[in-house]
Amino acid sequence: MNIAQLLQAGTDALNRGGLDEAERDFRRVLAVNPQVGGAYANLGVVYMKRKQWTMALGPLRKAEHLMPHEAGIRLNIGLAYYRQNEFLKAIPPFESVVRDQPEWLQPRHLLGLCYFFADRWADAAQTLEPLWTQESGQLSYLYVLSIAAHRAGRKELDEKATAQLVRIGEGSPEFHLFMGKAHLNLEQYDLALADFQAAAQANPKLTFVHFNLGLTYLKKQDYEHARDEFLEDSAIEPDVTDNYEELGDVYTLMQQDADAEKSYLEALRRDPRMVNSWVGLAKVYQREQRYSQALSAIDSAGKLDPRRTDIHYVRGQVLIRMGRKEEGKKELEASVTIDNERRAEREKQVESGTVPSPELLQDDH
């Protein structure tokens, strides 16, 4: 077959779900002519279909270089970052697509969510507001828009979104889920608990309701109920990595280190970029005097977030325990220095009261 035939064969295989066959055909195209941008673009889609987001970025970036005016390629680059929770990296490609095609719903919605997760409230509200006609029947859209508008000081838009949220959703399990989430973010734990329990009673299999119940019980220091809710949610949504990380934290607080270790390792097996799981694992190993493993775990955390103060603090403690006192003292000093430099930012984060929101990432746009 010639290049055109191979490219078409690969595209046909991709469309019918034959990913291995499609990958083989696209690679054959590139072996003959490494300048075929469409083959790189489709190869990236193959990896995305497999949820191999990091691997997808290589061919997608090559496709972007060869076909810089193809907005769909930049959308997929943004998606590959978004699906890895790399919201700051997803913003530029999404922004470029929205600039080129401002009426395209999917990139605008995803860009608004990225701004939301980056605490860029005014940008989130401004980006999402034009989608009102298409999206105002979706509770998740209204919830995000109302929160962003509230925090951006856009009172009229906040009231409009909240009123619509109540109008279309009041009494439904999904409505109670989002209302509970709003209360949870405001640290109104009893109100959050009441809404989440109402949602769970109406639909015990509703995704993320048990996760959020677990978060609420964790905030209320009711660790046994928190554990049970995270386990329940992991049975309903086994691929949600946050469940295993939160379970690790709960087991740690219950002083059940073996279960904590197992949970953190499960979280990291699913997503090795979970910084909190690496830190939690390092603390477990430190308590058990498994210092080499503790150092390895905290080093993995440090590679992901080198400016996080508790990482330097734990690393300093571990090094001192290992007899490397000078190195340990330097790490402890670094933790204090960074802490002082970032105090204002950290206080701002504490005041925001934000909690994990995996339910907002299950977006099919």
Image: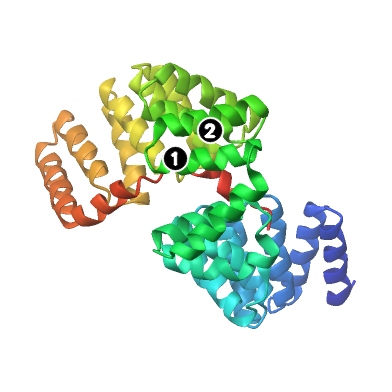
Distance of label 2 from label 1 (alpha carbons): 9 Å
Horizontal side, residue 175 vs residue 34: left or right: left
Q: What number of labels is visible?
A: 2
In the picture of the structure, the residue carrying the numbered disc 1 is 183
- Seen at 51% across and 56% down, the residue is 146
Looking at the rendered structure, the secondary structure element under dot 1 is helix
| Residue 187 falls in image quadrant | top left
User: Contact (CB < 8 A) between labels 2 and 1?
Assistant: yes
Horizontal side, residue 8 vs residue 81: left or right: right
- Seen at 68% across and 67% down, the residue is 133
* Label drawn at residue 252: none
In the picture of the structure, the residue carrying the numbered disc 2 is 195
In the image, residue 17 lies at what x, y percent?
83, 52
Closest to the observer, 362 or 73: 362
Residue type at mark 2?
A: Asp
Residue type at mark 1?
A: His
Mark 2 vs 1, N-terminal side: 1
- Seen at 18% across and 39% down, the residue is 316
Q: Does residue 83 show up?
A: no
Is disc 1 surrounded by few (<14), some (14 to 19) or many (20+) residues within 10 Å? some
Looking at the rendered structure, the secondary structure element under dot 2 is helix
Query: In the image, is residue 245 above or below residue 119?
Result: above
Query: In the image, is residue 204 above or below residue 162?
Result: above
Closest to the observer, 259 or 5: 259
Q: Does residue 156 show up?
A: yes
In the image, residue 234 lies at what x, y percent?
58, 28
